[in-house]
Image: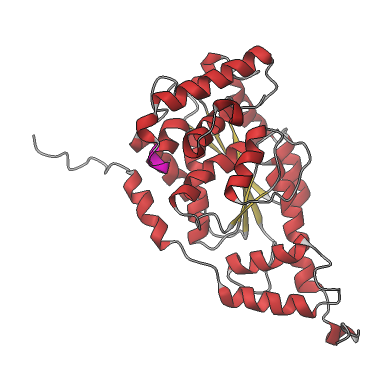
Amino acid sequence: MPADENAQPRATLAEIRDLLPRLPGPDLEAATTARLRQAQLTKPPGSLGRLEELAVWLATWQGRHPPRIETPRVAVFAGNHGVAARGVSAYPPAVTEQMVKNFIAGGAAINQLCVQIGADLRVYEMALESPTGDFTQGPAMDEEDCALAVSYGMMAVEEGFDVMALGEMGIANTTAAAALCCGLFGGDAADWVGRGTGVDEAGLERKRQAVQQAVEANRQALDDPFTALAALGGREFAAIAGAVLACRLARIPVVLDGFACTAAAAALFIADRRALDHCIVAHRSVEPGHSRLLQTLGQQPLLDLGLRLGEGSGAALAVNLLRAAALCHGGMATFEEAGVSGPSD
């Protein structure tokens, strides 16, 4: 039969893989300028701790000096998971769509945090009416579905903002995060599984069993991080990975939220150990798998507040620290400007 001239080309994971060698590296000139200024500011060297590191990191990945946090963006991707039907969450799958409506109405925690930091909030629904497949029985997504979700996340990155805080919403997504991490990094299901939304002992055991079954059912997909993402992640996970890639191409630093968000980005780390250099993790989730994942990625979170809400809440809070770092770096006087004596030789 002749090819359909109106057919759309299939999205493929190969196209996503091909982007990795083209990711821009750090702006070394901006980094050097930031470090030189840091040494001249009216303070003892290192006295602002990680704020000093953050200022240099922002300059490096914004590709400019001084760095600025004036127009932050918070993006929350929402998806439904077929594994939710196995009772791995304390809440029913319908809550995903209900919470999206709450975001749109301005009634969620992330709405209030966006007001506090002056951020533009964008919420992206990922085919909520069609949950991913139950990954205990086979792949959650096929290659095309995953590649389309990655592309959708990339298209969410537009011009006009200077830092991206990423978050997610999806009942059962801590189960997906645990399964993806177990598939990517190994270990037992129990190493990665926590209580998520607050499941009881029986629910916790169901989660462990679901994660173990998912890894066993998808062994053939685990040799490649992108096929692992398709098999064990969700549409919102793939979209987050896409947003991370697009931000790198656009020189926009990224703040990752908690366990699910970091797990989504971890597939890129496996593909290229430098792919997350423009990302920082906002906080350490109470999910035990998150601490294990942070250690594996070499990431030191900015906050440790016992958060486990998701929806970008920790990432939004961390934007305050980035703004403080940028303001101190750009606004403080140098020793020469202030007429203050520098360190003794």
Q: Please tell me whether the stretch drawn in magenta is mainly helix, strand or loop.
A: helix
Q: Which region is colored magenta?
A: 223-227
| Left or right for 116, reference 85 | right
Say if residue 49 shows up in the picture.
yes
Question: In the image, is residue 163 part of the stretch drawn in magenta?
Answer: no
At x 47% / y 48%, what residue is drawn?
Answer: 270
At x 52% / y 26%, what residue is drawn?
Answer: 80
Quadrant of res 227: top left
Quadrant of res 309: top right
How many numbered circles are shown?
A: 0
Quadrant of res 321: bottom right
Where is 328 relative to 339, above or below? above
**Which sits in the foreground, 158 or 83?**
83
At x 76% / y 78%, what residue is drawn?
Answer: 39
Image location of residue 212, percent across then percent down? 50, 23
Say if residue 132 shows up in the picture.
no
